Structure formats: C-alpha cells, structure tokens
Image: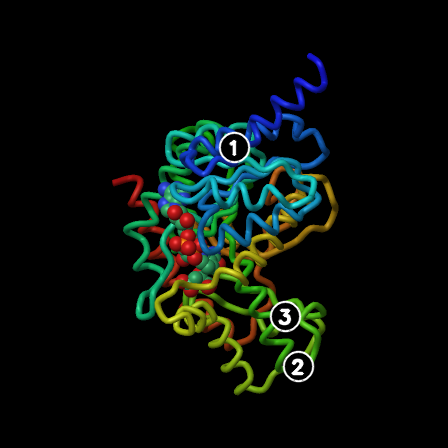
Amino acid sequence: MQPAVEARQRIARLSAHLNPTNSQMEVNTMLERVDCRAKGGSPGFKVAILGAAGGIGQPLAMLMKMNPLVSVLHLYDVVNCPGVTADISHMDTGAVVRGFLGQQELEAALTGMELIIIPAGVPRKPGMTRDDLFNINAGIVKTLCEGIAKCCPNAIVNLISNPVNSTVPIAAEVFKRAGTYDPKKLLGVTMLDVVRANTFVAEVLGLDPREVDVPVVGGHAGVTILPLLSQVKPPCSFTPDETEYLTKRIQDGGTEVVQAKAGAGSATLSMAYAAVKYADACLRGLRGDAGVVECAFVASQVTELPFFATKVRLGRTGAEEVYQIGPLNEYERVGLEKAKKELAASIQKGISFIKK
Ligand SMILES: NC(=O)C1=CN([C@@H]2O[C@H](COP(=O)(O)OP(=O)(O)OC[C@H]3O[C@@H](n4cnc5c(N)ncnc54)[C@H](O)[C@@H]3O)[C@@H](O)[C@H]2O)C=CC1
Ligand SMILES: O=C([O-])CC(=O)C(=O)O
C-alpha cells in the first residue's frame, strides 16, 4: 500500500475512534485497532487487573503501567473500563494496555495472563465489618476465579477483595473443583497491613519507614491482623503502652480510613501502592530473583488452620516457601489465639460458600 494511502486510512481510523458518538464498546474496539503497531513484544509479564475501574483499580492500573516488569496490561471491569483504558494507555511507558468490559469479555481479558490482581467488589461504609461484604463479594470472586481456572490456570492470583480471610478459601475451592488448584499461586494480599505497620512503627521510633520491617501475620480483619512488634527490624523495644497503641492502630487502620472517608469508601490509594509493591515482588519472583520475601495470606501448615498469613518466599512458581511465625512474646501469644479463633470461622465460611 502507498504510504500516503496508509497514513490517510490510519488518520480515518483515529478520527472514528475519537468520534464522540461512538459507544463505549466501539471505543474499546477502536483502541485495539489503532494500537496495531503495539505487539506487546517488549520483555516483561502479562498482567490483568479485575475491577480496574474502581477506587483501587484505577491508581493500581496507573502504577502497573509504570512498572518496567509489565509488558501487557489487561484492564477488566463491569463498568467504565473503556475510559480508564483510554486514559492509562496514553502514558508513555512500555506496557501495552487493553481494556475489557463486562462478563462477555472476561475470557479475552484473562487468556494468556501470568499475574491476575483482583480488587473487584464492594468496599465498606462506616459501621460495617469486612465480613459484611461477604454476601456480595463472595459471588464476584467465585465468578472471576471460574474464569481464571478456565483461561489462565497457571497464573499467579493476588486477591485483594474483602473479606480476604474468606475470599481466599473461596478461590481455593473454585480452583479445586476445576482441578487447577496450585496453593503456591493463590495469594491473599495483606501487604497494606505491613505498609501501615512500617509507617506507624517508624513514627513511634522516629525512623524513615523505608528502614523499618514489621512482620504482620494471621489474616486481614480486626484481631486477625497480628503485627509482631517483637520481630521488628531494626531490632528495638516498645513500652507496654506503645505496644498496645501500635497493635490497635495497625489492626484498625482500615477502619480509620473508612471513617475518615465518611461513606465514600475505604483505602484506595495506599492500597494501590501496597498492591503494586506486592505485585512487583511476585513479578521479581517469577523472573527468578533470589530472596524475594513478603507477607501474604496463603495455604499454610504453620498453624492448625488451612490458611494463614506469614512471610513467604516468592519464586518462579509463586509462594515457594512459607515461613514459620517465629518466636512470640506473651502479648503476641495471646493475640495469636484470638486471631486463630476468628480466622477459623472466616475460613470455614468461605469454604462452605462453595461446598454448600
Ligand atoms: N486486601 C486489602 O488490604 C484491601 C481490600 N480492599 C477491598 O477491595 C475491594 C475493592 O475496593 P474499592 O476499589 O475501593 O471499591 P470500588 O467500589 O471503588 O471498586 C470496585 C470495582 O469492582 C468492580 N466490580 C464489581 N463487580 C465486578 C465483577 N463482577 N467483575 C469485575 N469488576 C467488578 C466495580 O465495577 C468497581 O469498579 C473491596 O472489597 C475492599 O474491601 C480495600 C482495601 C484494602
Ligand atoms: O478496611 C477496609 O474495609 C479496607 C481494607 O481492607 C483496609 O483498608 O485494610
């Protein structure tokens, strides 16, 4: 074809794409066509975000588009995805971005993906617990995981949707039913608890949060969030008052944001930051980097419970090693018993949702 003709046709396609009378779906299709030179061939991983148009999804999509380990970024949601995709796709970073709208495009969104991040679902309002989200979010997570089992059974899954203590067991049961369950690849994201713990502990110690490492074990709701202040690095000690203040503030960090947002949702920006920090660790593990260790809520034999959050080593196949809790002081031993009691019920609730 003559270069001039080709250029005119390309401009015609672009003007069609920019025509405000296009429906959302047409814009979506045109975006892929206009994107014809972008083959997604740069080195990196293929990542999908499910719930990409939400409060967490949008900043998460932006930060993943900035991650040099990502070559292809699929954005999926049941609403507003074409707009978010168009917006993010203009960023001059390496990852090729494609948008997918609605259940009929879920399979296309998932096919070929290596890491799936799921922030789909409703957030809390003041006065609610994370468990109050179960009735809506359980069904959403089930449907999305059925799609993953069918279209990308080998992908690593980072599950953010609450209540994480129940949605991770739900996902495991869906994958077991489909015959695709690999416990190493299903990771409940508890990174925000660690991010908060590092921040609040650094404040008390007068340190830079980037120098602080606080293991947070158990789960992701109230008393199941158990910061291990006796294992903080750099080594330090806390008074009983400091221990009480820090433990409560870390456990109630989510509620602090829900109340401050006063009905407009829960943590989104700090969560997107934490999700990207965690996804980046997963991608470095997949690449084969040594010594990538972060906390996550995973299938575990560390306690008598089938799932528990501790530090895990991330490698080419996912969570390749689940670390023990380590030595606890008396305050933490009491906290662990409370955490396990609540966790056992939340895990069972998730399992029963699929088995019923
Ligand atoms: N694990 C953690 O540390 C944290 C978890 N969360 C949880 O993350 C979830 C999302 O929170 P936000 O982004 O603030 O909520 P949001 O309501 O702003 O966004 C959720 C998005 O999910 C989409 N969605 C709903 N059903 C869907 C489906 N079937 N398939 C695909 N997408 C679907 C919605 O259209 C919306 O765009 C909530 O359950 C919240 O509790 C929030 C903060 C921290
Ligand atoms: O508190 C919520 O509902 C959201 C969440 O999980 C968190 O911010 O830790």
Q: In the picture provided, is 236 more to the left or to the right than 176?
A: right
Image position of 273 with respect to 139: above or below: below
Looking at the rendering, the quadrant in which ligand 2 lies is: bottom left
Q: Residue at label 1?
A: 17
Quarter of the image for the C terminus: give it.
Answer: top left
Callout 1 touching callout 3 (CB < 8 Å): no
Disc 2 marks a residue whose amino acid type is Leu
Residue in front for this viewpoint, 130 or 328: 130
**Mark 2 falls on what kind of element?**
helix
Q: Residue at label 2?
A: 205
State whether residue 27 appears in this view: yes
C-alpha span from label 1 to label 3: 55 Å
Q: Position of residue 52 (x, y in %)?
A: 48, 46
**Mark 1 falls on what kind of element?**
helix
State whether residue 219 appears in this view: no
Q: Residue at label 3?
A: 231
Callout 1 touching callout 2 (CB < 8 Å): no
Q: Which mark is residue 67?
A: none
First reached walking from the N terminus: tag 1 or tag 2: 1
Image position of 212 with respect to 269: above or below: below
Q: Position of residue 40 (x, y in %)?
A: 66, 30
Question: Which is closer to the viewer, label 1 or label 2?
Answer: 1
Question: Which is closer to the viewer, label 3 or label 2?
Answer: 2
Disc 1 marks a residue whose amino acid type is His
Disc 3 marks a residue whose amino acid type is Gln
Q: Residue at x 56, y 26 (%)?
A: 13
C-alpha span from label 1 to label 2: 54 Å
Residue in front for this viewpoint, 215 or 270: 270
Image position of 246 with respect to 81: above or below: below
